[in-house]
Structures are given as C-alpha cells and as structure tokens.
C-alpha cells in the first residue's frame, strides 16, 4: 500500500470523515462545493488504496455532499492495524505510522486541511480582503494537542488560542503572505475550494468574501481540473 496516499486518506477521515460505530461504513461529508474534490481526488484515492468504488450522494437535509463505502476488510484494517477509532472522534488519535515520519505528516496535513481547514483573508488596514489566514479548528482533546506537535515538528509558524466554537475549541492559525506561500508549496492542497482562493489571491492581490467556487474559476478563466 502507498503510505503517502494512506496518510492523506487518514487526514481526510480525521477531518470530515466518520467510521460507523457498529456497521462497516466509512463516510466523508462536506459542502456542496466539495463535489469536485470528491470526484477528482477522494474517490480515485479510495479506489487505489482499497480497490473499492465509493458512492457519492447529496444530502438535502444538510445541503451537503457525502461520499461513502462499506467494507469490513477496510474497516478492520483502519481500526485494528492503523489504530483509527470508530464513532465519535473526541477520542481520536493520530496513528504512529504518521507521527514518526515527516514525509507522511505532510500528506496527512494535506488531507486534514483539504477537508477541515479554512483559508480566509482579512482587510487589516486596507479596503479589500488581502491578508491571508490559514486556519484549523478542533474541539479540545488529545488529538488537538497531537496536531500541535505535528505542526511544530514541520517548522510551521502558527498561533493558537481557545475559542467558544466547539464548546471551547482550539484554533490554529498561520497568517501572512510568506506563511501562505510556504503552506501551499509544501502541503500542496488538493481541494479546489482552497486552491481557487489561493490562485485568485495570487492574480488579483485580494479575495472576495463569500465568492463561489464557480465565480472564482470564471474570473481566472480556468477549468475546475486546474485546481488540484
């Protein structure tokens, strides 16, 4: 098995994924705009790793898309060999396979950021949103502290603070142009939701808040396949 791709998949699972507590169902849930990421990145990744073609459906009740598949073999592998935990992720841990290998940490952070990360731009002292902020937010837990250790191990500068979000969650943030450029150069995000924001900022020097993925792609005169 390709450990780099496995590490990225584990990041995806620990971001927006869920291992069913009793059934052998593995699910990843995202926004409507994540459909492109699911089709171009996540689905092929699952097929390559586990030789399974997952199903992608829209959840009208949550205005979201989700991708899922059923496999006892894969569930046993992820839980019994890799060490992922079924059900609520409050007790989640980062597998030692990843934490001990810097190369795998990068792929893990890619999957985690693609699914659970956020790229924002603030105005600071200008009239446009130009100042980049990369954020990861989690409910406070041992997993949150492990994320801090991984980010520190990779020499990424970041600030950390507690927030009312997630009942007292923890926010990790990298801010500034150089930090954004380094993140995209090293982590190489795959989700068009993030990469289109980055390319828009690179071209125009600012970002338009609440702009859609489609509008950003049209503004850049590019196709969706460009953004991974």
Image (spheres, helix red, strand yellow):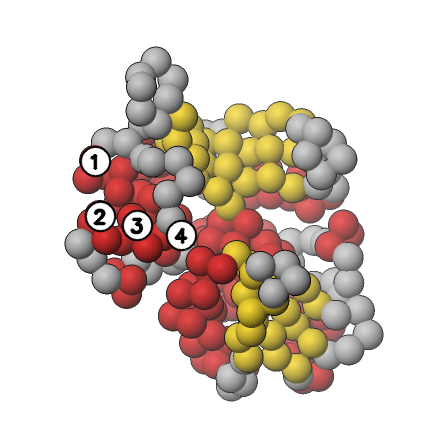
Secondary structure of residue under mark 3: helix
Secondary structure of residue under mark 4: helix
| Tag 1 residue | 204
Q: Which of marks 4 and 2 is in front?
A: 2
Residue in view at x 60 percent, y 39 percent: 137
| Tag 2 residue | 219
Check contact, mark 1 vs mark 2: CB within 8 A: yes
Check contact, mark 2 vs mark 3: CB within 8 A: yes
Of the image marks 4 and 1, the number of the one nearer the N terminus = 4
Q: Which mark is residue 215?
A: 3
Residue in view at x 32 percent, y 55 percent: 214
Question: Real-space Cα distance between discs 4 and 3?
Answer: 11 Å
Q: Nearer the viewer, residue 91 or 226?
A: 226
Secondary structure of residue under mark 1: helix
Q: Which of marks 1 and 2 is in front?
A: 2
Question: Real-space Cα distance between discs 2 and 3?
Answer: 6 Å
| Tag 4 residue | 193
Question: Real-space Cα distance between discs 4 and 2?
Answer: 14 Å
């Amino acid at each position: 098995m390709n450990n780099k791709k496995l590490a990225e998949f584990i990041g995806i699972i620990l971001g927006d994924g869920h291992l069913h507590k009793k059934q052998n169902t593995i699910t990843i849930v995202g926004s409507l705009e994540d459909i492109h990421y699911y089709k171009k990145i996540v689905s092929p990744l699952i097929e390559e790793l586990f030789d399974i073609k997952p199903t992608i459906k829209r959840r009208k009740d949550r205005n979201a898309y989700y991708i899922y598949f059923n496999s006892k073999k894969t569930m046993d592998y992820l839980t019994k060999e890799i060490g992922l935990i079924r059900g609520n992720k409050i007790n989640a841990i980062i597998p030692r396979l990843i934490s001990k290998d810097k190369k795998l940490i990068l792929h893990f952070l890619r999957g985690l950021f693609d699914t659970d990360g956020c790229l924002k731009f603030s105005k600071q002292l200008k009239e446009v949103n130009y100042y980049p902020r990369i954020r990861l937010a989690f409910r406070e837990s041992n997993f949150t502290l492990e994320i801090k250790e991984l980010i520190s191990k990779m020499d990424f500068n970041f600030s950390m603070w507690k927030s009312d979000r997630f009942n007292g969650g923890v926010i990790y943030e990298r801010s500034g142009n150089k930090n954004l450029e380094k993140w995209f150069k090293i982590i190489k995000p795959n989700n068009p939701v993030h990469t289109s924001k980055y390319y828009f900022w690179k071209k125009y020097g600012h970002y338009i808040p609440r702009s859609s993925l489609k509008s950003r792609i049209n503004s850049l005169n590019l196709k969706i396949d460009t953004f991974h």
